[in-house]
Amino acid sequence: MKLKNQLKAALRSLAKNKMRTFLTMLGIIIGVGSVIAMLAIGQGSKESIQKQIASLGTNLLTVYPSASMTGGVRLEAGSSIKLTIDDYKSLASRCPAIMYSTPTVRTSGQLIAGSQNWRTSVWGVYPDYFNIRNLDLEKGAVFTMMDDRTANKVCIIGQTVNKYLFGEGQDPTGRMIRINKIPFQVIGLIVTKGQNAWGQDQDDIVIAPFNTVQVRMLTVQYIQSIMVSATSEKQIPEATDEITQVLKERHRLGPSEDPDFSIRTQADIASTATATSGILTALLASIASISLLVGGIGIMNIMLVSVTERTREIGIRMGVGARGRDVLLQFLIEALMISLIGGFLGAGLGIVASGVIASLMKWPVTITVQSIILSFLFSTAIGIFFGWYPARKAASLNPIDALRYE
Amino acid sequence: MLHRWAVHHNLLVAQEEVVDMKETIISVEHLVKVYKMGDMEVHALRGINMDVHKSEFVAIMGKSGSGKSTFMNIAGCLDVPTKGVYFLDGVDVGKMNKDQLAHLRNKKIGFVFQSFNLLSRTSALENVELPLMYNIKISSKDMKERSIQALESVGLADRAHHMPNQLSGGEQQRVAIARALVNDPVVILADEPTGNLDTRTSVEVMSIFQQLNTKGITVIIVTHEPDIAAYTDRNISFRDGRIQKDILVEKPRNAAAELLTMPVLTAEETI
C-alpha cells in the first residue's frame, strides 16, 4: 500500500473514534508537556545558578598564604604574613595566563557620616578589582592607580552602606565619611549585587585604594591575598600552575616541597552547583518521563482493543490481498500518529505551562530546542515501541480466522 | 443418477474439443484438509480432484459440513490444504508463502462472501478501491477509474459515495462483487453469495454473475440452494469431503429474463 493511502487510512480510522483517540493522545500530550516543562525549569535554575557564579567571576583565583604553624599550633589560613607586594608584582608581570590582578588587604572599620554610623569591612585593592569581580558603578567612577600611589583618601561604597549612612537612593558621591576617624571622600556607588550563593550581603562593603588601606589604616607591610582573573575559564589550571611556579621560586621552595600558599578557584564551586542542578533536572525529567511511559502504555492498550475490534476488517483487508506487513504498517502508523500528534500538542502544552510557571511562580524557566527535539524523539520511540506489539498481533492473524471472527 | 466417474468421463468426452482450447484455471488433485480441534481430527476434505476451465460458471453444492466452504477457502488462497496439489492459473499454490498467497489473492482472485464483508463507514467506491490499494503499481487516478467502472458493471455507479449502511443487502453484495472484479481476477469465488438475500435480490445477484460470465469471467459459487445452482453451467456436489456428483446443467436458467417477469416488491412488502 502506498504511504499516502496508508496515512489517509490511518487518519480515517483515528477519526472514527475521536474521543478514544483524543484520550489516548492525552496521555502523550501530558507526558511530553511535563517533560518539556520540567526540563525548562531545570535548565532555568541551572542557568540562574551559573549566572550567579559567573557574577562572582568564574575565572577568579585567589592566592592566600598558607596557615602558619608556630610551635605545632596551626593558625587560621591566611593568618601568616608570607605574601608581599613583590610577590604580587612578579605574578602580575610573569604569568601570561593572568588577565587582571590585584593585591588585597582587608580590615573592618566604623563608618561615620553626619549623625549616622555603620560597621563594615573595608577592602584595599587596585582598580583592577572591579574588572575581576565584574563590579559596575551606579554613580561616580573608580579610583585610579594615581590615587593608590598617593594613598588618596577616597572610597567606593556598596548599596547597604549607602542605605545606612545616607539613605536609600541617595547619591553619596562627593560626600565625606570617616572610617576609623580618618576622613574619606566617597567617589562611587556600586550597583546592587544582592546576596551571594552563601547568603552574604555583597552590598555591605567599602572599597578603597590598596595603599590607602595598607598604609593609612592597617600600617602593615604584608598583603592578605592576591586576586587574579585568568584570561578565560579554561585557562584557570594554566594560571594556577604559573602562579605556583612563580611563588615557589620566589619563596625558595623546591618543586617537590609543599607550597606555603594556597590557590582557591570558583571552578569547583561552579561545577558542584552545576552538577547539583543537573541532577535536579534529571530527576524532574525522569519523573515526567514516567507519565510519558504511562501514556505509551495507554497507546498499547487502545491499539490492542482496536486490533480485537477490527479483526474482521483485518480479515477483509487480508482477503483482498493485504500482506502481513501492510497490516503491520497500518496499525503502526496509527500508533505513531497518536504519539506524534500527541507529541506536537504536548510540546505546545509544555511551552505554555513553562510560561505560566515562569510568570506565576517567578521561577527562572528556559525552554531549549534540544528538549523539544528530545521529547519528539521520545514520543516517536514510544509510538513504535508500544504500537509494535498490537500491530504484530494484527499482522500475524490468519485471514480465514479473522474473516470468521464475530 | 449416474456414477460420478461416468459423469466426469462424459463431460470430458463432450467437451473434448473445447477443453483443449480452454485453459485450466483451477486444478486440484487429491486435496485433503484436516482440522485439529483439540484432540479431535476433523476431515473436512478427503481427496478432491477437480479442474475448472476458463469461462466456466460452476456451482458447488452440498449440505453444511460437506466441505464446500473449506474447498472455497483453499481455492481462494485464504487457507492451505493439508495434503494435495492446487494449481491456480498455472501456479503451484502449495509452494507459496504467506506474502505470495496475499499477492495471489490480490491479483488472481475475487472473493465474494455471504455476509458481504464491506468495510463499515467507508464509501462503496473506497470499498471497491481496497484491492487496488494493495497493488502499488496502480496510480490513484487509475484506481478511481477502474473502481467506478467496476461499480458500473454491477449497476451501482450512482451509489458510489454511499456508505454500506445506506445500501440494501443486494446493493451491498453488488458492491462486494464490484470489489471482487476490480483487480481483473482470473476467477471470482463466491461463498453463498445469496445466503443473506431474498429471492428477488438473489436473482439480481445471479444475473450479475451470469452477465460477468458471458464476458468470459470464470465464476465459482458455493450454494446449498438447487434453485440458485440452476443458474450456473456446472454443478458439483460435495458430500463428506468428497465429490459426489459433477454434472453439466443442460439448460441454465436465465436470471435477467426471469427478473423481468418477477414482481417488484414495494418497500412495505420487503419488510
Image (cartoon, coloured by chain):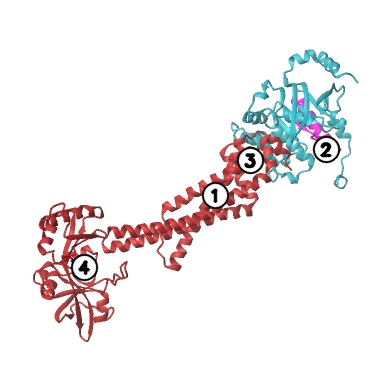
Chain colours: A red, B cyan
Label 1 vs 3, first from the N-terminus: 1
Q: Is residue A52 depicted above or below A386 in this figure? A: below
Magenta part of the chain: B189-218
Q: Can residue A134 be seen at all in this image of the molecule?
A: yes
Q: Which residue is mark 1?
A: A339
The crowd level at tag 3 (other Cα within 10 Å; few <14, some 14-19, many 20+) is many
Q: On what subunit does the disc labeled 1 rest?
A: A
Q: What's the amino acid at mark 4?
A: Glu
Q: Which mark is residue B201?
A: 2
Q: Are the residues tagged 1 and 4 within 8 Å (C-beta)?
A: no
- Residue occupying image coordinates x 9% and y 62%: A86
Q: Nearer the viewer, mark 1 or mark 4?
A: 4
Snapshot quadrant of residue B129:
top right
Q: On what subunit does the disc labeled 4 rest?
A: A
| Distance of label 2 from label 4 (alpha carbons) | 108 Å
Snapshot quadrant of residue B52:
top right
Q: What's the amino acid at mark 2?
A: Thr
On the image, the x and y values in percent for residue B31 come to: 75, 23
Q: What's the amino acid at mark 1?
A: Ser
